[in-house]
Image: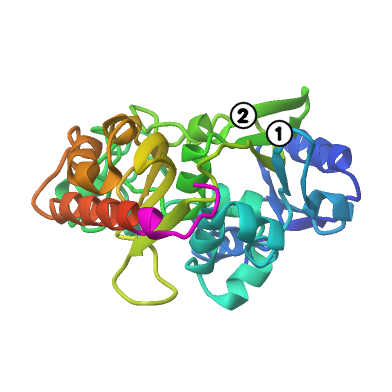
Amino acid sequence: MRPVAYSRPRTPEEAIDLLVGAGGAAMPLFGGTTLLDLAKLEVLTPARLVDLRALRPDYRAISRDSDGIISIGGLATMAEVARHPLLRREVPAIVAALDQAASPQLRNMASIAGNVLQRTRCPYYRDISWSRCNRRIPGSGCQALAGIATSHAVLGTSDACMASYPGDLAPVLAALEASAVVMGGGGRRSVPIDGLHRLPGATPQCETVLAPGELILAVRVPHFACLKRSTFVKLRNRAAYEFAEASAMVALDLEGGVVRDARVGLGGVATVPWRSRAAEARLVGMRPVDAAMDAANAAFREAVVRSDTAYKVEMGKRALVAAIRQAVAMDIADD
């Protein structure tokens, strides 16, 4: 049993002081659905837990401002967001992604910020008996490159890591140009979700651009005409409580059956939450169903596969085509 100190600050400033003061030995806690899991496995060994549950309720608020920007409190739970009428009416893809994630018990506990920042499910990362994992032990190598790599990524990989990003929500937010309101020792700043996670490159242990002690206080989703016609398709090995083998979010703005604007996010197939601008470009100006396969091929043109990950390309394409067809079929009165 490892000794762990525990703090329950009442303000973000106090929480950040504790996190920064610990020099990387402290970690924030809210639902704990990832952190406590990895701590039990001894993948993460924090010396102090900084419990954020006593922070003001407004860090869980969901609202829309006069510019149409939707703000989601970073400490709002997945369940709170999924059942909120504003999100259900205005951005159905967010609701669909959350409804298909984890289990009802976990959705009632996990925060939006924690969900976006969740760690990979790579078995070589999560099992400390494997001695070669560049995320866990920098410079040790990547066991997946020489071992079984089923469920690993085909987009954004490197010679140092091919672990897939597991979350459903972040690819949706990345494609919708959402940003995280971040607070740390240097004050507040805005970080695009599309740039929050780092590609593994040669340093896969550096997973995000957040500085030590920085917290996500809110996620802001800008207004686009395509938000209401947005959908999410998830392909997985079982119908519930399973991570995506491949997922796709599509948002379309149509005029006369032709795409004026398109957003495409992919999950389960990449090392980070993935926005496919190549697929978007193939859809704009076209009838979406006619262009669906062309968009899917463009989305995976730069995929790097091996024998046990090649299926991911076909699954990803099928998920994207299905999402395009679902988005077109949505009954949106304004189109």
Q: Is residue 151 above or below residue 205?
A: below
At horizontal 31% and vertical 30% (from top left) the residue drawn is 285
Whole-percent x, y for residue 9 in the image: 88, 50
Whole-percent x, y for residue 310 in the image: 13, 51
Residue toward you, 262 or 7: 262
The answer to whether residue 95 of the structure is visible from this angle is yes
SS label for mark 1: strand
Compared across the picture, whether 277 is left or right of 253 comes to left
Whole-percent x, y for residue 124 in the image: 32, 55
| Crowd band around label 1 with a 10 angstrom C-alpha radius: few (<14), some (14–19), many (20+) | some
Q: Exactly how many numbered labels are in the figure? A: 2
**Residue found farthest to the front:** 256
**Residue found farthest to the top:** 186
**Pointer 1 and pointer 2: residues touching (CB < 8 Å)?**
yes
Residue toward you, 158 or 247: 247
Q: Is residue 285 above or below residue 168?
A: above
| Crowd band around label 2 with a 10 angstrom C-alpha radius: few (<14), some (14–19), many (20+) | some
Q: Of label 1 and label 2, which has the lower sequence position?
A: 1
- Amino acid at dot 2: Val
**Of the numbered discs in the image, which one, if any, rests on residue 182?**
1
Q: Which residues are magenta?
A: 326-335
Q: Quadrant of residue 210?
A: top right
**Of the numbered discs in the image, which one, if any, rests on residue 191?**
2
SS label for mark 2: strand
Let me know if residue 293 is in the magenta part. Answer: no
Q: Is residue 266 above or below residue 177?
A: below
Q: Quadrant of residue 138?
A: top left
- Amino acid at dot 1: Val
At horizontal 18% and vertical 45% (from top left) the residue drawn is 293
The answer to whether residue 45 of the structure is visible from this angle is no
